[in-house]
Image (tube, helix red, strand yellow):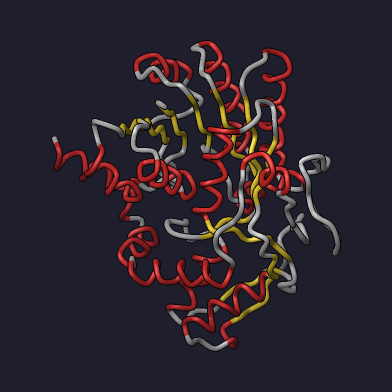
């Protein structure tokens, strides 16, 4: 297939492109990324070197730019769209939700309209378990769970999900929606829990933990999520929603302690800070439908996945330092300047 992958320089999008390039040797990918603070072109260096100009093409731009999206769809004869592009950090959405509405709602609407106009065969919209809100101590989210978002971020994602559903129901447009639990793994921007805690622990700094640290998340290694998205692209039932999870519920404080233990650091570094407004207490995903219809199953448990993640950060300290210093922001100009 000829794929338009949006947000492909971000954490999950980059891992998805690496997966497809490795496992689908006939596919061609156009990566459209706005390169906001969380979009890192260094994530794609190996792909650029090996496949650039043949199976891989990068375009810097906004999914809200209908003319640009239309040009890509038309000139590259795109068969399918996989939409990872999103503002995704809850804390930032609390401070200012405007970018979340623009990208996650308006941007998705524009991408849907252009894709429909140019006859895209399949549109996979990558969403989140946060649209379901919060769980009590028991139970799991299924695809039939009501949407009850509690942050501006999750509200914007729920809105984009509903637009996708509406395009399927109204226009018979070939949409598939995926919702996933918390991801971790290579290339994750260090504002998120696991890379942030790793970085601070490595430097012997205080590790800030929200509230009492008892919030529970279902963790999935990013490569497993990406395989689920690719299964949804190639085998998913049109109009369906598929949940993906890692079958790895963990309290935030236990995740932090696992990282400290792996690095040989003291738990005295943990500092409890004021809880985040609207902080959901627990998420857990039932992915029976994805297992039944797509053959999805996570391949790594949390113990194996967190060790692989820590090993990756240990081996790629220059990547982490570049992100933390902001040096990655100038990388694209250097990269293309050297190649021109």
- Residue 232, position as x, y percentages in the image: 58, 36
Left or right of residue 264, residue 271 in this image: right
- In this rendering, is residue 88 above or below 276? above
Left or right of residue 326, residue 192 in this image: right
Q: Residue at x 60, y 38 (%)?
A: 100
- In this rendering, is residue 292 above or below 106? below
Left or right of residue 328, residue 87 in this image: right
Q: Looking at the figure, which quarter contains the C terminus?
A: top left
Residue in front for this viewpoint, 226 or 72? 226
Q: Looking at the figure, which quarter contains the N terminus?
A: top left
Q: Which residue is drawn at 49% across and 48% down?
A: 12
The quadrant holding residue 281 is bottom right
Residue in front for this viewpoint, 221 or 162? 221
- Residue 55, position as x, y percentages in the image: 29, 32
Residue in front for this viewpoint, 215 or 278? 215
- Residue 253, position as x, y percentages in the image: 66, 75
């Amino acid at each position: 297939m000829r794929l338009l992958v949006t947000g492909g320089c971000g954490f999950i999008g980059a891992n998805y492109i690496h997966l497809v390039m490795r496992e689908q040797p006939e596919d061609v990918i156009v990566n459209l990324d706005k390169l906001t603070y969380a979009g890192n072109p260094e994530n794609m260096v190996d792909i650029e070197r090996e496949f650039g100009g043949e199976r891989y093409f990068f375009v810097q731009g906004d999914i809200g730019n209908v003319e640009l999206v239309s040009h890509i769809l038309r000139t590259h004869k795109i068969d399918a769209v996989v939409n990872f592009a999103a503002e995704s950090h809850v804390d930032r959405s609390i401070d200012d939700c405007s970018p979340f509405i623009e990208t996650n709602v308006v941007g998705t609407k524009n991408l849907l309209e252009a894709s429909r106009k140019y006859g895209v065969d399949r549109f996979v919209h990558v969403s989140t378990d946060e649209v379901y809100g919060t769980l009590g101590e028991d139970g799991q989210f299924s695809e039939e769970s009501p949407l009850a978002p509690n942050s501006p971020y999750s509200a914007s994602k729920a809105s984009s999900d509903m637009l996708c559903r509406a395009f399927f129901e109204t226009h018979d447009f070939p949409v598939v929606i995926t919702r996933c639990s918390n991801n971790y793994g290579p290339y994750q921007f260090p504002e998120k829990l696991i890379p942030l805690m790793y970085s601070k622990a490595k430097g012997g700094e205080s590790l800030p933990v929200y509230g009492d640290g008892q919030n529970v998340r279902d963790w999935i290694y990013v490569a497993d999520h990406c395989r689920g998205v690719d299964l949804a692209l190639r085998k998913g039932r049109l109009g369906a929603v598929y949940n993906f999870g890692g079958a790895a519920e963990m309290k935030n404080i236990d995740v932090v302690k696992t990282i400290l233990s792996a690095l040989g650091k003291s738990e005295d570094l943990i500092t409890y800070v004021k809880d985040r407004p609207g902080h959901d207490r627990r998420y857990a995903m039932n992915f029976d439908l994805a297992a039944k219809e797509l053959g999805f199953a996570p391949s790594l448990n949390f113990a194996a996945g967190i060790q692989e993640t820590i090993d990756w950060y240990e081996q790629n300290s220059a990547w982490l330092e570049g992100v933390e210093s902001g040096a990655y922001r100038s990388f694209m100009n250097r990269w293309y300047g050297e190649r021109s």
